[in-house]
Image (spheres, rainbow, N blue to C red):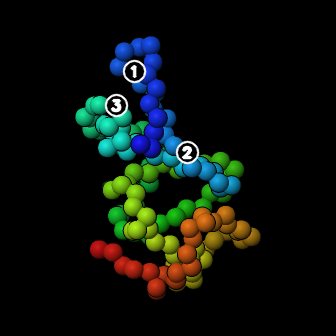
């Protein structure tokens, strides 16, 4: 299970700690996996709302982000559980994408980065 559960002295109050993955760019963790949450707590609830900054990317749409500050929280929801077999990477500076990156940008890229051009990338519908 991706999270550990600690019981407290208060009945029905649990502390859930997600596994944290990190590198020089920062960290990542699942703040909510509905199936893991239900399994860990024994509850069968569906949450209606999360409160934090929001960004909507359509399923299957290539996406990434650049952080122009020392710290940023980037939270997002997914339409399905993580499956590495479906992960794809596009070269961040492919001219066909048409992004004007900041001058002097030296990105810290994921070790998973592949160098596919936009033209080589699979399309999803």
Disc 3 on helix, strand or loop?
helix
Q: Quadrant of residue 65?
A: bottom right
Disc 2 on helix, strand or loop?
loop
Callout 2–callout 3 Cβ contact below 8 Å? no
Is 1 in front, or is 46?
A: 1
Q: Earlier in the sequence, mark 1 or mark 3?
A: 1
Q: Earlier in the sequence, mark 2 or mark 1?
A: 1
Residue 80 pos. (x, y %):
33, 56
- Any mark on residue 13, and which? 1
Q: CA distance from mark 2 to mark 1?
A: 22 Å
Is 95 in front, or is 33?
A: 33
Residue 69 pos. (x, y %):
67, 52
Packing grade of label 1 (10 A; few <14, some 14-19, many >=20) is: few
Packing grade of label 3 (10 A; few <14, some 14-19, many >=20) is: some
User: Residue at label 2?
Assistant: 20
Q: Does residue 97 appear left or right of residue 57 in this picture?
A: right
Q: Quadrant of residue 31?
A: top left
**Above or below, comparing residue 32 to residue 57 in the picture:** above
Residue 122 pos. (x, y %):
39, 80
Packing grade of label 2 (10 A; few <14, some 14-19, many >=20) is: few
Q: Can residue 25 be seen from the camera position used here?
A: yes
Q: CA distance from mark 2 to mark 3?
A: 19 Å
User: Residue at label 3?
Assistant: 41
Residue pushed farthest right?
A: 104
**Residue at image x 65%, y 47%?**
71
């Amino acid at each position: 299970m991706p999270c550990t559960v600690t019981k407290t002295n208060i009945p029905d109050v649990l502390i859930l700690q997600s596994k944290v993955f990190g590198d020089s760019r920062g960290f990542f963790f699942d703040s909510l996996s509905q199936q893991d949450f239900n399994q860990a707590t024994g509850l069968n609830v569906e949450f209606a709302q999360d409160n934090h900054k929001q960004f909507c990317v359509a399923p299957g749409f290539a996406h990434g982000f650049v952080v122009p500050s020392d710290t940023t929280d980037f939270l997002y929801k997914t339409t399905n559980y993580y499956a590495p077999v479906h992960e794809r990477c596009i070269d961040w500076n492919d001219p066909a994408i048409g992004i004007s990156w900041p001058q002097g940008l030296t990105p810290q890229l994921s070790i998973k980065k592949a160098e596919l051009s936009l033209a080589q990338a699979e399309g999803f519908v």
